[in-house]
Image: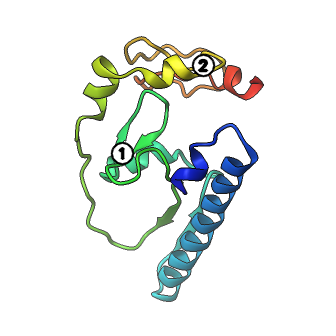
């Protein structure tokens, strides 16, 4: 997503950047799924409606999990939208990567937690305990209180 626009959060300008990112994500995922279908395989394109994006993205080596609850990529930081295509097309799988996000978030930075107006981002260590019913059960990670965030 556009860096300058996203820097203006919370604003309508940043919201437009997010909406544009989702639109491009949907278009690209659907185009690739159509291509796979035309090859004779099954393909279902999705964005935020089916399956958890961040665990798949981490497993695919696209980035690491950040304290802010987002996927952090090498090139774009957290400014990405993640589309997925569920398919039976035989593929070679990538592996998770590490480029220092966990260490940086854990011991060096914590700026997102300090700057979060509703205090929805944890300062603590990754944990499996969930703050509320909107959280994903059974995943050890930095927890973000989504309900507190959405209320804000």
Dot 2 falls on a residue whose secondary structure is loop
Is 132 placed above or below 57 here?
Answer: above
Q: Which quadrant does the C terminus fall into?
A: top right
Residue 33 screen position, x and y as percent: 53, 75
The residue where tag 2 is placed is 120
Viewed as shown, does residue 32 lie left or right of 60? right
**Rendering coords of residue 19 (x, y %):** 69, 57
Q: Which residue is mark 1?
A: 58
Q: Nearer the viewer, residue 45 or 1?
A: 1
Residue sitting at x 50%, y 63%? 86
Residue 51: percent from left, percent from top: 55, 48
Q: Residue at horizontal 42%, vertical 11%?
A: 124
Q: Is residue 140 left or right of residue 19?
A: left
Could you say whether the residue bearing mark 1 is in a helix, strand or loop?
helix
| Depth order, front residue of 150/3 | 3
- To which quarter of the image does residue 10 belong? top right
Q: Residue visible at 50% across and 65% down?
A: 85
């Amino acid at each position: 997503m556009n860096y300058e626009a996203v820097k203006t959060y919370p604003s309508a300008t940043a919201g437009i950047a997010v909406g544009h990112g989702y639109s491009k994500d949907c278009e690209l995922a659907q185009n690739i799924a159509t291509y796979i279908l035309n090859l004779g395989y099954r393909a279902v394109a999705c964005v935020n409606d089916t399956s958890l994006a961040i665990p798949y993205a981490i497993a695919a080596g696209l980035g690491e999990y950040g304290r802010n609850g987002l996927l952090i990529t090498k090139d774009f930081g957290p400014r990405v939208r993640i589309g997925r295509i569920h398919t039976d097309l035989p593929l070679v799988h990538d592996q998770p990567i590490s480029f220092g996000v966990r260490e940086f978030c854990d011991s060096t930075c914590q700026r997102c937690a300090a700057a979060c107006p509703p205090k929805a981002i944890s300062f603590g260590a990754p944990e499996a305990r969930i703050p509320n019913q909107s959280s994903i059960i059974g995943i050890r990670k930095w927890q973000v209180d989504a309900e507190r965030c959405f209320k804000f």
